[in-house]
Image (tube, rainbow, N blue to C red):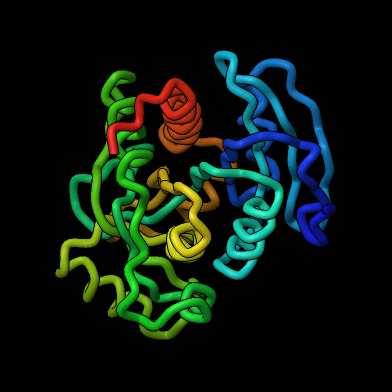
Amino acid sequence: MLQPHIQLDEALNIRYAILPGDPARVSRIAAQMENTEEIVFNREYRSLKGVYKGVPILAMSTGMGGASMAIAVEELKNIGVTHIIRIGSCGALQEGIGLGDLLLVNGAVRDDGASRTYAQDTYPAAANPGLLLACVQSARELDVPCHVGIVRSHDSFYIDNQDEINEYWSRRGLLGSDMETAALLTVARLRGIKAASILNNVVLWGGDTFESIGSYVEGESAPARGERLEITVALEAFVKAERGELLL
């Protein structure tokens, strides 16, 4: 059945989906795959399919925020997708996380609205342990600078007490913040999809968010390198899954 938002159906017959937020990032995923083919671009959902080391992969953007991510996960479930990895950007909440370093998320604080429509606040947003471990192993094999831990997902950059909120969560050991991970991990878990999130740090702790994001969009070297690496790590993790190498 054709899904109303992503405009895909079961005929796609692909189990693995890599989900960036930015539609432009789909092209940069395509650069690492073979036999790529654009499928459809509807609303924020731009999709293409390709092959990486013999494994068919769907790359599809989700736009910004948890609501569009939740819709994407629901509709991908309906067409047979079983494994999802988000590749996105984040701002660091700790010293020592460099620009272009990757955060491999094992859980997320659900400070967004979308995930809260699915379950009460005490329900955890947790990555699938096997897929997360595959991401960690892939990052280590590629010698990628990375950090494993918890992040916070939120709904807006433009709130009056953002600095206070960041300080609060930094003191509690969170590594970074984004806008989509909590929704992905919550909905995927409830729908029986194996999901993980890889975030590319584009803002140093204590840095200027707006200046850093602008530099990232313009293609500064460290964040751009981090983006390429998070794509590779995700693709390699899917290869491990296809080969039956998920340990958990």
The foreground one among 53 and 26 is: 53
Where, by quadrant of the figure, is residue 132 drawn? top left
Q: Position of residue 34 (x, y in %)?
A: 67, 16
Where, by quadrant of the figure, is residue 240 drawn? top left
Identify the residue shown where x is 61% and y is 70%: 67
Task: Give left or right: position of 90 versus 136.
Answer: right
Q: Is residue 139 above or below residue 77?
A: above
Q: Position of residue 70 (x, y in %)?
A: 59, 64
Identify the residue shown where x is 28% and y is 32%: 247
The C terminus - image quarter: top left
Where, by quadrant of the figure, is residue 65 drawn? bottom right
Q: Is residue 166 above or below residue 139?
A: below
Residue 134 visible to the viewer: yes
Identify the residue shown where x is 36% and y is 81%: 121
The foreground one among 196 and 103 is: 196
Q: Position of residue 74 (x, y in %)?
A: 63, 60
Residue 225 visible to the viewer: no
The foreground one among 186 and 36 is: 186
Image label count: 0
Identify the residue shown where x is 45% and y is 48%: 195
Q: Position of residue 72 (x, y in %)?
A: 65, 57
